[in-house]
Image (spheres, rainbow, N blue to C red):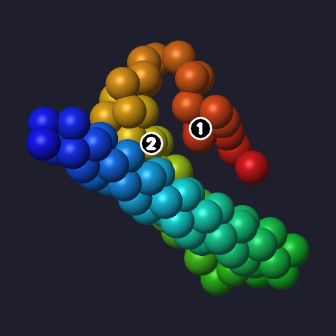
Amino acid sequence: MISIIKALTQSLRLYLELRNRLAFFEIKNNHRRIKNELINEIEELRAAGDSNSSDRADLLRKRLKSENDDFEHISTVFIKAQGGDSSSNSGGGIHSSD
């Protein structure tokens, strides 16, 4: 009976860990998509070269910075929750800029 409870507890722990990793994977993919969209729009606006485009590109650049800062925070929390050291890059490229 105790072995069944231990097995159930272990299964639940593994399930929740997998769910957390999947949620982070989705967050990471969403971040990359948003980041790439912002970069592409900034490049298009910079290529236009007029004053309004430059102002809009500056605003998008600030939004991109905010998006990167938010993701950095989320990934740091995830690494700590996984038992890693957020000061090292032990997250398997989580903080990479691609």
Asked whether disc 1 touches disc 2, contact meaning CB atoms under 8 Å apart, the reply is yes
Secondary structure at badge 1 equals loop
Residue density around tag 1, few if under 14, some if 14–19, many if 20 or more, within 10 Å: some
Residue density around tag 2, few if under 14, some if 14–19, many if 20 or more, within 10 Å: some
Who's the residue at 65% across and 70% down the image?
33
Amino acid type of the residue that numbered disc 1 sits on in the rendered structure: His
Q: Is residue 87 above or below residue 1?
A: above
| Quarter-of-image position of residue 39 | bottom right
Q: Earlier in the sequence, mark 1 or mark 2?
A: 2
Amino acid type of the residue that numbered disc 2 sits on in the rendered structure: Ser
Q: Is residue 37 above or below residue 12?
A: below
Give the Cα distance between marks 1 and 2.
7 Å
Query: Residue 6 in the image: x percent, y percent?
Result: 21, 38
Could you tell me if residue 64 is visible in this image? no
Depth check: give the residue in front, 7 or 85. 7
Q: Is residue 15 left or right of residue 36?
A: left
Who's the residue at 53% across and 17% down the image?
88
Q: Is residue 76 above or below residue 8?
A: above
| Label number found at residue 75 | 2
Depth check: give the residue in front, 18 or 82. 18
Depth check: give the residue in front, 67 or 92. 92
| Label number found at residue 95 | 1
Q: Is residue 35 above or below residue 10?
A: below
Who's the residue at 12% across and 42% down the image?
1
Who's the residue at 54% across and 58% down the image?
25
Q: Residue furthest right?
A: 47
